[in-house]
Image: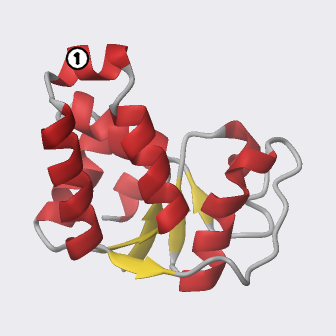
């Protein structure tokens, strides 16, 4: 199964490994699913992991963040989204996330973002809890 994980799911899974997002990350680590990302998502992950409150919670240095993002770059399937034109009405900053889903033809986009979830009638978008039930 090929999925796109929104940044909020990845960061939540890292901070709380026993949570539902944590189980999704573990399933990826155990090669039970294929993760698809794009450069905009990787950039957002780098930015969010560098937030002081996230660094405090994880205890990661900037070097560890760079290593983790490098691991994501190597282990995930990367797609180019620049030619995909989509619009998330609730939050245009989420356009790259939806573009990654479309460019990758992934089975699901897993997110907790309400703006993206509002589009689930048109696209295969599910919450982390919905996705875990499919594993």
Residue 36 as seen in the image, left or right of residue 66: right
Residue 12 as seen in the image, left or right of residue 70: right
Q: How is the image coloured?
A: secondary structure
Position in image of residue 22 (x %, y %): 24, 42
Q: Nearer the viewer, residue 51 or 14?
A: 51
* Residue positioned most to the right: 89
The quarter of the rendered structure image containing the C terminus is bottom left
Does the image show residue 126? yes
Q: Which residue is mark 1?
A: 57
Position in image of residue 115 (x %, y %): 75, 43
Give the secondary structure at mark 1: helix
How many marks can you see?
Answer: 1
The quarter of the rendered structure image containing the N terminus is bottom left
The quadrant holding residue 87 is bottom right
Query: Which residue is at a point 61% across and 83% down the rendered structure image?
Result: 103
The quadrant holding residue 104 is bottom right
Position in image of residue 27 (x %, y %): 20, 61
Residue 77 to residue 41: above or below: below
Position in image of residue 86 (x %, y %): 81, 69
Q: 10 Å neighbourhood of mark 1: few (<14), some, or many (≥20)? A: few
Residue 121 to residue 55: above or below: below
Does the image show residue 20? no
Q: Nearer the viewer, residue 11 or 73?
A: 73
Q: Nearer the viewer, residue 35 or 74?
A: 74
Residue 122 as seen in the image, left or right of residue 26: right
Residue 30 to residue 16: above or below: below
The quadrant holding residue 31 is bottom left
Query: Which residue is at a point 51% across and 80% down the rendered structure image?
Result: 106
Query: Which residue is at a point 72% across and 70% down the rendered structure image?
Result: 123
């Amino acid at each position: 199964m090929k999925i796109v994980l929104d940044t909020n799911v990845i960061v939540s899974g890292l901070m709380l490994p026993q949570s539902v997002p944590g189980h999704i990350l573990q399933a990826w680590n155990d090669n039970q699913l294929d993760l698809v990302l794009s450069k905009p998502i990787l950039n957002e992950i780098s930015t969010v992991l560098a937030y002081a409150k996230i660094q405090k919670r994880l205890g990661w240095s900037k070097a560890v963040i760079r290593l983790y993002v490098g691991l994501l770059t190597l282990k995930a399937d990367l797609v180019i989204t620049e030619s995909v034109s989509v619009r998330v009405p609730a939050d245009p900053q989420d356009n790259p996330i939806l573009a990654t889903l479309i460019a990758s033809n992934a089975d699901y986009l897993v997110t907790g973002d309400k703006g993206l979830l509002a589009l689930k009638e048109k696209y295969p978008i599910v919450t982390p809890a919905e996705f875990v039930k499919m594993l």
